Image (cartoon, rainbow, N blue to C red):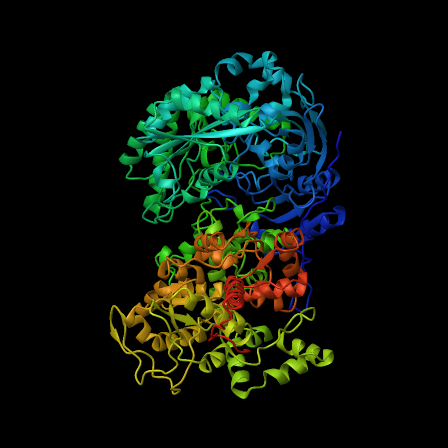
């Protein structure tokens, strides 16, 4: 027996200072403040009634919003008991919450929310002999899976949110997942449950009436005929209470009947779950069909082959280049075996049995994970229709008998058309369970009316096919009102009587399952402003509407993932702190509440939003990793722009936000050597860091004694050489002033590849060109300076100095006019600068057509070589690599050309994911050092420590190289530097062989 008890990775919640009254006489304490004080007095866990804590819990992953009174993070069952006692005495509802990924609204409430993810998140015991585990409700499923895997075991159910959903939430909703055709629902895998009733009684639930509250047995026995005939017999019947599990022929299993009760009967404090054997090898058969109805009709016929999964999805949810076989819809059928050959044989047998248009069998684990990621991201991807319009849950997971799925889908499509609605079904075809996001209009009264009518008609359609309104995610507010259509009034009254036996005071999650709130009330969009707000960025994917940008976050919480490594970046600050307010979802929730103006009342001046965004590294990982493309880096820049308008900014905004200006002045005055010397004097460095708002733990970077363009001007012979394509090499601030060796190396490699290299113009035209935005309008007055430097505006954008950023970028466009007219590609060596030009530039200057032209001209170093020197073969380095793909490269630019270039040069191995934690000014700013270091320790620094001695440490970003040097004591290099060094080595070898020196036109200290 093993005991892998793990303490919570979450950091302690920040203490919240109370605000004193400005009145001369003390104000009477409010009911909320009294409740808060009483909870604080008797709990050891955190009690938070501040605006931030409440705002973070207003929503789950549904269409609904409720404002809680406060949030409690209990440390143990005794804390839960104490909280229940206080809330019962004051008549305050209690809502149990895990990962907050519920899609029907059941993880929201107006009372006290119990957040189990902070402390009650341990794996208490794992027993391979009995194949059981003892878990607390806040334990994330993936942590249990990782602990069970070395024993060849796993927990059978695995929702697509497995990396952040909790066992308590899975039990509350009776979650299922893609492997339910093999291993059933959560209820099928529960042995015993420890539960506290609303009146504080501790019950140990199990079979044989174990733990049944008084009167439950009599209720069930008196209604045995209805329990035997009134519940549909299908694998995914999740709706209502599972009272039929109390029948004697089903073992009178109280624990099983508790599963799926959505926190309305009792509060789970501990669970004994059963584990199943995981096949040592797996294969994935991907079957192509003409449409989803054909795939659905084929799914049931594959079940005799005992697959592990039979998942379906249509082409609308599949990104281009996914590598799937021909078809308009696909089934993902997984098979297992003792060996890879056995698993593959079973997959090929499935292919032979399937009447598919085309098929593919995948056995390589990495390729399987890539395909599964498409399916798992569908819950977010489906929130946008192909034309970019919004789609929402609400009818997310109806289930019908698998044999009727094809017919049901045809009727479902017809019902959608009759209401002029659109949706793309996907989901668990082998179990007859369909997920779909529909383009409901939940913003206007007519749209909400149509939402209700469609919901009522669809409920009738599901029942007509012998189905369940919920096949996985529970009823919540989305469907509970319609349960009488499925079960009839008498069975629903039986549910009400059962609820009264468990919770006579109706304290636990009221309004769910019985006596529900109307399905079209409490909609989360109703509180948003009726008109768009004025913003600086263009938000082209959201029609220029910041409200729509904030609505992108639907709460699937992929940003809360903390387990595993890999290429993903999102969300480094949450992985470092474990706090919801430092996740992408948490920040989006706060922005939503800022727009709503109910909890957060001071708009753009909000300190709550400012503090949450303070630890956003602007890594842009969410832009790619978030299934719905939330771009928190842009939202942060937008917020800071408004927050500090006409106000004093932090020192770091001036010292690092205006870094290009300071460095250009240093270069003009040639004072870099003097400043380097002064920075080496500890007392002087400490004073400088204090004044500049720089973390005292940081070392000030050394400035280059000669800039990159200074070296360029002194090159001999002429600057442009060769007969190949002309490229403009962008002298970004970091390459120019801090790492000119990167620029020199890039010139060496680009010219060796036959390209002609030049730098951007430095002379402004006498008149700025006209800017077109609908009608022709004059551009801003010409700048007085005739000479200027290009700049991507990154440091201004990241600190929210958007007016200055716009001025800098317009000047840059003026300088780049000749380049844009000539159509010359622009090579940018610093990934963050390239990303700024690709995304921030056209989104900030959305009224200037030149911005899109420059963004389209930007190439990374590897892209330039691949597109403009395709016949060139790089020198052979033949060494392993370690390091990290730059977060902006991952999120915006893509690294496929870099991978191919490394492979061609014999650089083997993979770079880690994540974020280095320095992220431009973030890791240097005072107060960020510990989070910055924690981010580096997540993936980057461990990958370096584990690397072989001869490994090449790659880091294309200046921030990444600085973090490696300061925290890891390792020198990272840009890929251009590694290739240039190899070229020099080859050149030296030829000289030794021929005795004739070759002229090096790139030499010279920079």
Query: Where 597 falls versus 251 (above or below)?
Result: below
Please state the horizontal and vertical placement of residue 483, each as a whole percent of the image: 46, 27
Total number of numbered discs in the rendering: 0
Q: Nearer the viewer, residue 249 or 893?
A: 893
| Left or right of 943, for residue 1 | right
Please state the horizontal and vertical placement of residue 459, each as a whole percent of the image: 39, 29
Q: Residue at x 48, y 69 (%)?
A: 794
Say which quadrant the C terminus sits in.
Answer: bottom right
| Left or right of 934, for residue 496 | left
Q: Nearer the viewer, residue 402 or 835?
A: 835
Query: Where 564 falls versus 790 (above or below)?
Result: above
Quarter location, residue 29? bottom right
Q: Nearer the viewer, residue 833 or 362?
A: 362
Q: Nearer the viewer, residue 338 or 472?
A: 338
Q: Is residue 533 visible?
A: no
| Left or right of 404, for residue 128 | right
Say which quadrant the N terminus sits in.
Answer: top right
Please state the horizontal and vertical placement of residue 976, each as a whole percent of the image: 50, 64
Residue farthest to the front? 994
Q: Residue at x 36, y 45 (%)?
A: 320
Q: Is residue 906 visible?
A: yes
Quarter location, residue 868? bottom left
| Left or right of 136, for residue 383 | left
Q: Residue at x 48, y 42 (%)?
A: 62
Quarter location, residue 331? top left
Residue farthest to the left? 775
Please state the horizontal and vertical placement of residue 350, each as a whole percent of the image: 43, 22
């Amino acid at each position: 027996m093993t005991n892998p008890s793990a303490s919570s990775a979450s950091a302690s919640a920040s203490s919240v200072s109370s605000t004193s009254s400005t009145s001369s006489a003390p104000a009477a304490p409010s009911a909320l403040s009294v409740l808060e004080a009483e909870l604080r007095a008797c709990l050891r866990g955190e009690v938070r009634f501040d605006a931030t804590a409440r705002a973070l819990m207003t929503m789950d992953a549904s269409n609904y919003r409720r404002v809680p009174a406060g949030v409690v993070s209990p440390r143990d069952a005794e804390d839960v008991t104490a909280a229940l006692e206080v809330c019962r005495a004051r008549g305050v509802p209690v809502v149990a919450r895990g990962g907050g990924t519920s899609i029907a609204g059941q993880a929201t409430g107006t009372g006290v929310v119990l957040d189990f993810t902070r402390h009650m998140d341990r794996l208490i015991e794992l027993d391979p002999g009995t194949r059981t585990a003892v878990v607390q409700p806040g334990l994330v499923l993936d942590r249990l899976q990782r602990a069970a895997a070395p024993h060849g075991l796993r927990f059978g159910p695995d929702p697509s949110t497995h990396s952040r959903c909790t066992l308590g939430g899975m039990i509350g909703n009776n979650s299922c997942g893609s492997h339910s055709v093999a291993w059933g629902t959560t209820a099928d895998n529960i042995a015993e449950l420890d539960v506290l009733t609303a009146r504080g009684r501790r019950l140990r639930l199990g079979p044989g009436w174990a733990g049944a509250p008084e009167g439950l047995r009599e209720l069930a026995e008196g209604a045995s005929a209805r329990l035997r005939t009134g519940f549909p017999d299908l694998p995914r019947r999740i709706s209502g209470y599972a009272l039929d599990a109390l029948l004697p022929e089903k073992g009178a299993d109280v624990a099983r009947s508790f599963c799926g009760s959505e926190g309305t009967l009792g509060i789970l404090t501990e669970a004994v779950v059963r584990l199943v054997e995981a096949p040592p090898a797996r294969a994935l058969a991907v079957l192509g069909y003409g449409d989803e109805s054909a795939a659905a009709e084929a799914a049931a016929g594959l079940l005799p082959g005992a697959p592990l999964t039979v998942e379906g999805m249509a082409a609308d949810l599949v990104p281009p280049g996914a590598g799937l076989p021909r078809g308009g819809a696909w089934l993902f059928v997984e098979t297992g075996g003792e060996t890879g050959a056995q698993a593959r044989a079973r997959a090929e047998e499935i292919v032979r049995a399937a009447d598919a248009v085309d098929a593919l069998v995948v056995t390589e684990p990495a390729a399987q994970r890539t395909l599964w990621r498409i399916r798992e991201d569908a819950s977010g991807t489906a929130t946008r229709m192909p034309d970019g319009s919004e789609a929402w849950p609400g009818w997310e997971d109806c289930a019908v008998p698998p044999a009727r799925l094809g017919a049901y889908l045809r009727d479902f499509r017809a019902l959608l058309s009759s209401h002029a609605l659109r949706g793309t079904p996907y989901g668990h075809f082998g179990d007859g369970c369909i997920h779909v996001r529909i383009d409901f209009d939940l913003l206007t009264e007519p749209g909400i009316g149509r939402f209700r009518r469609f919901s009522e008609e669809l409920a009738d359609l599901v029942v007509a096919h012998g189905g369940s309104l919920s096949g996985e995610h529970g009823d919540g507010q989305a469907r509970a009102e319609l349960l009488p259509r499925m079960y009839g009034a008498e069975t629903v009254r039986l549910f009400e009587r059962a609820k009264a036996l468990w919770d006579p005071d109706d304290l636990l999650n009221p309004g769910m399952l019985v006596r529900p709130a109307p399905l079209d009330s409490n909609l989360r969009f109703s509180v948003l402003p009726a008109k768009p707000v004025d913003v600086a960025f263009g938000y082209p994917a959201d029609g220029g509407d910041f409200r729509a940008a904030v609505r992108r976050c639907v709460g699937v919480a992929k940003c809360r993932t903390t387990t595993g490594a890999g290429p993903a970046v999102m969300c480094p600050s949450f992985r470092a702190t474990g706090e919801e307010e430092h996740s992408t979802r948490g920040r989006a929730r706060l922005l939503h509440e800022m727009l709503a103006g109910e909890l957060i009342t001071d708009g753009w001046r909000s300190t709550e939003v400012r503090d949450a965004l303070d630890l956003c590294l602007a890594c842009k990982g969410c832009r790619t990793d978030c299934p719905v493309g939330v771009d928190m880096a842009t939202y942060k820049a937008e917020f800071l722009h408004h927050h500090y308008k006409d106000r004093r900014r932090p020192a770091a905004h001036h010292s690092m936000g205006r870094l290009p200006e300071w460095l250009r002045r240093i270069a003009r005055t040639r004072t870099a050597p003097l400043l380097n010397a002064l920075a080496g004097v500890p007392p002087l460095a400490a004073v400088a860091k204090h004044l500049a708002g720089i973390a005292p733990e940081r070392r000030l970077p050394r400035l280059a004694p000669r800039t990159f363009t200074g070296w360029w001007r002194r090159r001999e012979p002429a600057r442009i050489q060769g007969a190949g394509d002309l490229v403009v090499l962008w002298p970004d601030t970091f390459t120019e002033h801090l790492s000119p060796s990167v620029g020199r190396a890039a010139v060496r490699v680009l010219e060796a590849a036959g390209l002609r290299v030049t730098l951007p113009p430095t002379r402004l035209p006498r008149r700025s060109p006209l800017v077109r935005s609908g009608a022709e309008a004059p551009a801003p007055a010409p700048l007085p300076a005739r000479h200027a430097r290009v700049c991507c505006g990154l440091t201004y954008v990241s600190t929210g100095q958007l007016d200055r950023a716009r001025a800098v970028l317009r000047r840059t466009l003026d300088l780049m006019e000749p380049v844009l007219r000539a159509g010359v590609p622009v090579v940018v060596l610093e990934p963050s600068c390239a990303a700024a030009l690709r995304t921030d530039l056209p989104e900030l200057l959305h009224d200037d057509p030149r911005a899109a032209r420059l963004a389209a001209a930007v190439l990374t170093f590897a892209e330039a070589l691949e597109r403009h020197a395709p016949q060139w073969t790089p020198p052979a380095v033949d060494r392993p690599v370690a390091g990290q793909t730059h977060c902006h490269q991952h999120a915006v630019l893509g690294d496929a050309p870099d991978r191919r270039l490394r492979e061609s040069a014999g650089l083997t191995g993979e770079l880690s994911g994540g974020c280095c934690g320095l992220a431009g000014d973030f890791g240097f700013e005072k107060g960020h050092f510990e989070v910055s270091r924690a981010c580096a320790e997540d993936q980057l620094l461990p990958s370096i420590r584990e690397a072989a001695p001869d490994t090449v440490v790659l880091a294309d970003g200046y921030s990444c190289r600085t973090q490696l040097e300061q925290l890891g004591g390792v020198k990272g290099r840009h890929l251009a530097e590694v290739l240039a060094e190899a070229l020099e080595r080859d050149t030296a070898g030829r000289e030794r062989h021929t005795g004739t020196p070759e002229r090096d036109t790139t030499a010279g200290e920079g």
